[in-house]
């Protein structure tokens, strides 16, 4: 009898341990994100923002009684590498969801992988309209970033108020650059018909020598320029442009999209930054628009141990926040159920309420815009006044 009791107890223990262990397995989230090269200027803080959200969530007990685990892989801002990393994350690391990518080449490529594997993919940064275009949209892709249409039209509204008629553009020759430039030009011509586009330059993504493009553009004598060169590439471009007197020639009537006004960019350049241009950013530690944003900024500053914390962290943070709220709503980690829960979902984020539209899986994500100036409070340029541009009227 004693042996039977012992055997029954042992058998029960063997059966119960896997069940208990399974219930406590972390929810794995894979993040392909550039962590090296010029794109790391934005990719690294975005991944840290995601990790901060997860650390805070796990400290409160996680979601559905389970902790979250973030697995970040360096996509190198390359579409092929992002696809390879996404497949590995799904097949080898057995992630439950994907949140990530940065460039508008990576996002659509990883979206195909998500569709093939029927796994929810939330894009926190890629803006190209092609990501959620009707012929590319599928049940598992969602975006909490802005779009090229929103960004291009927002910039056009600003430039239309300048006393200029001869406008030029310079953008990388790939999805993001092409799409945002088209949106900018089309909208500018619509709201200010007197504008003439006198020049368009298209360096390849990753270009390091911008001198030929700058000289060619200066020869056309534009009065204003819209650029969407971003990240560490903008740093290189603007240093070369300043040396050639480019910004002086157009009287600093220059608007840098691709977050040329972000704290990461101005901090990294310091005295080399072309103060006086206009720029945009997803966030700014000095914005302080609401109590929620001020609280987030304080926590981020402590987390990163940085008095002037990153703007890009907010996109990784929001991506994880939206995913977690969908998991709660679905009461499941099943991708099909979470995908349905994401439709029409509204989440209170550090930058205000964001809603995922059902028709195109797109969040109403706008950005901050402003003219850059030097402020005695900071050792680098800031946007002042900094204004959040509501994207609603620019969303088709």
Image: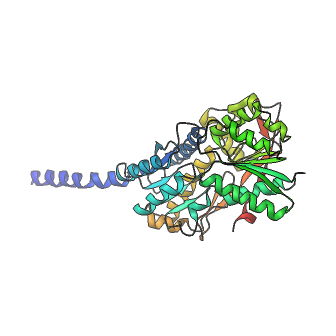
Residue at 10 percent across and 51 percent down: it is: 3
Residue at 84 percent across and 38 percent down: it is: 249
Residue 209, can we see it?
Answer: yes
**Percent of width and height locating residue 9:** 19, 52
**Percent of width and height locating residue 332:** 44, 63
Query: Which quadrant of the rendered structure holds the N terminus?
Result: bottom left
Query: Which quadrant of the rendered structure holds the C terminus?
Result: bottom right
Q: Is residue 217 left or right of residue 104?
A: right
Q: Quadrant of residue 39?
A: top right
Q: Is residue 91 left or right of residue 145?
A: left
Which residue is outermost to the right?
A: 163
**Percent of width and height locating residue 115:** 45, 63
The one nearer the camera, 5 or 160, is 160
Residue at 60 percent across and 45 percent down: it is: 204
The one nearer the camera, 335 or 154, is 154
Residue 146, can we see it?
Answer: no
The one nearer the camera, 123 or 292, is 123
Q: Quadrant of residue 334?
A: bottom left
**Percent of width and height locating residue 298:** 68, 40
Residue at 75 percent across and 33 percent down: it is: 273
Q: Quadrant of residue 311?
A: top right
Q: Is residue 283 left or right of residue 76?
A: right
The one nearer the camera, 336 or 252, is 252
Number of marks in the rendered image: 0
* Applied colour scheme: rainbow
């Amino acid at each position: 009898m004693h042996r039977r009791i012992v055997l029954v107890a042992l058998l029960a223990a063997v059966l119960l341990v896997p069940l208990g262990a399974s219930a406590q397995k972390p929810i794995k989230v894979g993040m392909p994100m550039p962590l090296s090269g010029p794109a790391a200027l934005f990719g690294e803080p975005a991944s840290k923002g995601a990790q901060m959200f997860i650390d805070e969530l796990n400290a409160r007990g996680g979601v559905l009684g389970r902790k979250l685990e973030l697995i970040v892989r360096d996509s190198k801002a390359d579409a092929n590498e992002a696809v390879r990393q996404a497949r590995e994350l799904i097949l080898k690391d057995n992630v439950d969801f994907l949140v990530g990518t940065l460039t508008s080449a990576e996002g659509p490529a990883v979206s195909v992988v998500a569709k093939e594997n029927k796994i929810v993919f939330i894009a926190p940064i890629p803006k190209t309209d092609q990501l959620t275009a009707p012929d590319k949209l599928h049940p598992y892709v969602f975006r909490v970033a802005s779009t090229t249409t929103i960004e291009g039209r927002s910039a056009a509204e600003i430039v239309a108020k300048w006393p200029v008629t001869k406008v030029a553009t310079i953008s990388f020759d790939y999805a993001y650059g092409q799409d945002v430039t088209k949106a900018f030009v089309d909208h500018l011509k619509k709201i200010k018909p007197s504008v003439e586009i006198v020049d368009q330059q298209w360096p390849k993504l990753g270009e390091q020598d911008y001198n030929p493009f700058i000289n060619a553009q200066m020869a056309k004598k534009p009065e204003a320029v819209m650029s969407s060169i971003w990240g560490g590439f903008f740093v290189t471009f603007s240093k070369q442009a300043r040396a050639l007197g480019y910004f002086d020639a157009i009287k600093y009537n220059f608007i840098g999209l691709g977050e040329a006004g972000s704290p990461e960019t101005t901090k990294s350049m310091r005295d080399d930054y072309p103060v006086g241009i206009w720029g945009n950013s997803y966030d700014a530690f000095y914005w302080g628009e609401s109590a929620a944003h001020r609280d987030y900024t304080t926590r981020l500053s402590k987390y990163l141990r940085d008095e002037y914390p990153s703007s890009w962290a907010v996109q990784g943070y929001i991506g994880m926040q939206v995913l977690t709220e969908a998991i709660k709503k679905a009461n499941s980690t099943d991708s099909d159920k979470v995908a349905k829960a994401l439709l029409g979902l509204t989440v209170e984020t550090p930058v205000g309420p964001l809603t995922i539209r059902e028709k195109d899986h797109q969040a109403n994500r706008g950005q901050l815009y402003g003219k850059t100036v030097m402020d005695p409070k900071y050792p680098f340029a800031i946007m002042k006044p900094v204004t959040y541009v509501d994207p609603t009227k620019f969303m088709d």
